Image (spheres, rainbow, N blue to C red):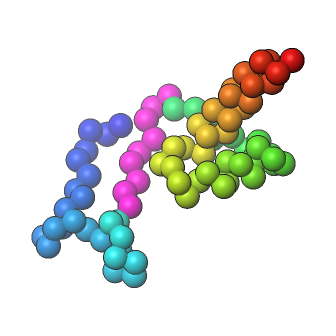
Amino acid sequence: MTGELVPLFGPQGLSSDPATGQPASITLPVPAGWPAAPEQAAYHGLPGAIVAKIAPHTEADRATRGRTLRVNSAGLEDRLM
């Protein structure tokens, strides 16, 4: 992190995308030591489809959604066996 403040408000209030009227998105720098995102191959098949389906409904990072899905699936499988 750089410690810089990211302004969310412009002179007229909350900055927004003129095309959609939605609040403008901000991109923060990746913290030092943050793990790299998995390659595209990690999102193939059913797990990839589930992660993609959840994407519009969450702010969670794509890699986090994939890991959470795999951990919870393993726990469910363990209970069913």
65 in magenta: no
| Image coords of residue 38 (percent x, y) | 69, 40
Residue at 33% x, 66% y is 23
Residue lying at the far bottom of the rendered structure: 19
Q: Residue furthest right?
A: 81
* Nearer to us in this view, 44 or 11: 44
- 75 vs 68, left or right, is right
Q: Residue furthest toward the left? A: 11
**Residue 76 falls left or right of residue 2:** right
Residue 62 seen by the camera: yes
Q: Residue at x 34, y 66 (%)?
A: 24
Q: Residue at x 39, y 48 (%)?
A: 28
Most common SS among magenta residues: loop
Residue 33: x, y in percent?
50, 28
Which quadrant of the figure contains the N terminus? top left
> Residue 69 is drawn in which quadrant?
top right
Quadrant housing the C terminus = top right
The answer to whether residue 40 shows anywhere in this view is: no
Q: Is residue 31 one of those drawn in magenta?
A: yes
Q: Is residue 36 left or right of residue 45?
A: left
Please report the bounds of the magenta region as a residue range: 25-33
Residue 6, position in %: x, y? 26, 52
Where residue 14 sits, quadrant-wise, is bottom left
Identify whether 72 is placed above or below 61.
above
User: Residue 30's spot in the image, x, y percent?
Assistant: 45, 41
The one of 54 and 1 positioned closer to us in this rendering = 54
Give the answer, above or below, for where 64 lies relative to 54.
Answer: above
Residue 42's place in the image compared with 13, above or below, is above
